[in-house]
């Protein structure tokens, strides 16, 4: 097939895209597809005319934002639908549902999926107390991804710290604040692949053993992106060592959350496991980060699926979802 990889650019430089783009292109070519890279920053006209000229059989959608708009992936998916293009991953509705973490938790409530109790503090509402939430609390942006707005101060233990953190997210991140009860326990990630019959990969665990004493066991922006930080050096993801029964429970919880939010093709579910064995769904990442060394790709490899095969399967899932009749594959 003629496949166009759609990616967001960090600037007007056509090469300012993430390394994962070249990795996916190489994997597609290994499967005998014709792969081209189409990067856009914030130019809607370029987006539309580029696809009108390219006329791809499928778009491999790796775009996570549109210019400075971190929620632009929702709008771009809508444009792809209007252009009647087939593409991998979620549509605008699914992406919006996944992005609004408060709304996602309300879906979990309906589906009887365990999640931390929470409250949302919007930018345009008076400051409120967080109801009956129990300290300590974890405060993060409602819609931002990639650990934006998350650091050691995200974990608060009193009302004064809570108010400061909420206001910081309002002012610095320009987002509503999600306040949820902090779940003490092991942090695990379960990758899921599929649509009608999704399959969960072996769980990956975040190992916090290298973190300095007293530092909260959370994956903040420093742990993800600042290579010289104590947080980055003190954390690593490893294949989780789990009894079969517990592994099965974690995988079931992940698939339940994946289905509840109608994730398409592939995604990753973040979980917390308490000492008493309770499994909490923290977040669902639809169309999660695909880089060869990411938790998702490493988990797929543990399941016997090498990276080129993983990319090939995502393509096949998207094509199967659309079928022969076109449409939006919802």
Image: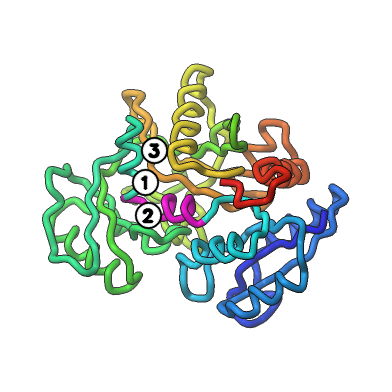
The residue indicated by pointer 3 is 281
Taking the magenta stretch, the answer to whether it contains residue 136 is no
**Nearer to me, 249 or 63:** 63
SS at circle 3: strand
Is residue 126 shown left or right of residue 34? left
Q: Which x, y percent locates residue 244?
A: 53, 18
The answer to whether residue 228 of the structure is visible from this angle is no
Q: Which residues are magenta?
A: 92-102
Mark 3 burial class by Cα count in 10 Å: few <14, some 14-19, many 20+: many
Q: Which x, y percent locates residue 254?
A: 48, 33
The residue indicated by pointer 2 is 100
Residue 74, placed above or below residue 138 = below
The mark that comes first in sequence, 3 or 1, is: 1
Question: What residue is shown at x 63% (from left), y 51% (from top)?
Answer: 327
Determine whether label 3 and label 1 are within 8 Å by CB.
no
The answer to whether residue 61 of the structure is visible from this angle is yes
Residue 83, placed above or below residue 312 = below
Figure label count: 3
* Tag nearer the camera, 2 or 3: 2
The mark that comes first in sequence, 2 or 3, is: 2
Question: For the view shown, which residue lies furthest in the front direction?
Answer: 325
Determine whether label 2 and label 1 are within 8 Å by CB.
yes
Q: Which x, y percent locates residue 132?
A: 12, 43
Q: Which x, y percent locates residue 50?
A: 71, 74
Is residue 130 shown left or right of residue 144? left
Question: What residue is shown at x 45% (from left), y 45% (from top)?
Answer: 284
Display colour scheme: rainbow
């Amino acid at each position: 097939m003629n496949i166009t990889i759609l990616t967001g650019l960090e600037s007007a430089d056509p090469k300012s895209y993430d390394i994962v783009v070249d990795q996916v292109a190489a994997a597609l070519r290994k499967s005998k597809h014709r792969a081209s890279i189409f990067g856009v920053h914030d130019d809607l006209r370029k987006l539309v005319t580029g696809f009108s000229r390219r006329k791809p059989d499928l778009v491999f959608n790796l775009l996570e934002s549109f210019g400075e708009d971190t929620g632009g992936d929702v709008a771009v998916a809508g444009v792809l639908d209007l252009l009647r293009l087939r593409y991998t991953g979620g549509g605008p509705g699914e992406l919006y549902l996944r992005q609004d973490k408060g709304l996602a938790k309300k879906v979990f409530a309906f589906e009887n999926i365990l999640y931390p109790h929470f409250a949302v503090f919007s930018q345009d509402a008076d400051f409120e107390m967080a109801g009956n939430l129990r300290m300590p609390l974890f405060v993060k942006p409602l819609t931002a991804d990639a650990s934006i707005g998350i650091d050691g101060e995200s974990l608060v233990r009193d009302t004064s710290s809570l108010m400061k953190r909420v206001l910081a997210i309002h002012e610095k991140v320009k987002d509503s604040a999600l306040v949820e009860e902090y779940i003490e326990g092991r942090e695990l990630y379960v990758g899921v692949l599929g649509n009608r019959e999704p399959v969960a990969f072996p769980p990956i665990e975040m190992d916090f053993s290298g973190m300095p004493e007293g530092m909260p066991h959370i994956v903040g922006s420093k742990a993800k992106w600042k290579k010289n930080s104590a947080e980055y050096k003190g954390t690593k993801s490893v294949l989780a060592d789990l009894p079969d029964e517990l592994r099965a429970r974690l995988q079931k919880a992940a698939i339940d959350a994946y289905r509840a939010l109608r994730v398409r093709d592939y995604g990753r579910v973040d979980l917390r496991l308490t000492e008493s064995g309770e499994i909490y769904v923290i977040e669902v990442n639809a169309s999660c980060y695909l880089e060869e060394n990411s938790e998702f790709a490493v988990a797929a490899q543990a399941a016997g699926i090498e990276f080129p095969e993983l990319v090939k399967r995502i393509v096949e899932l998207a094509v199967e979802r659309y079928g022969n009749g076109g449409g939006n594959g919802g």
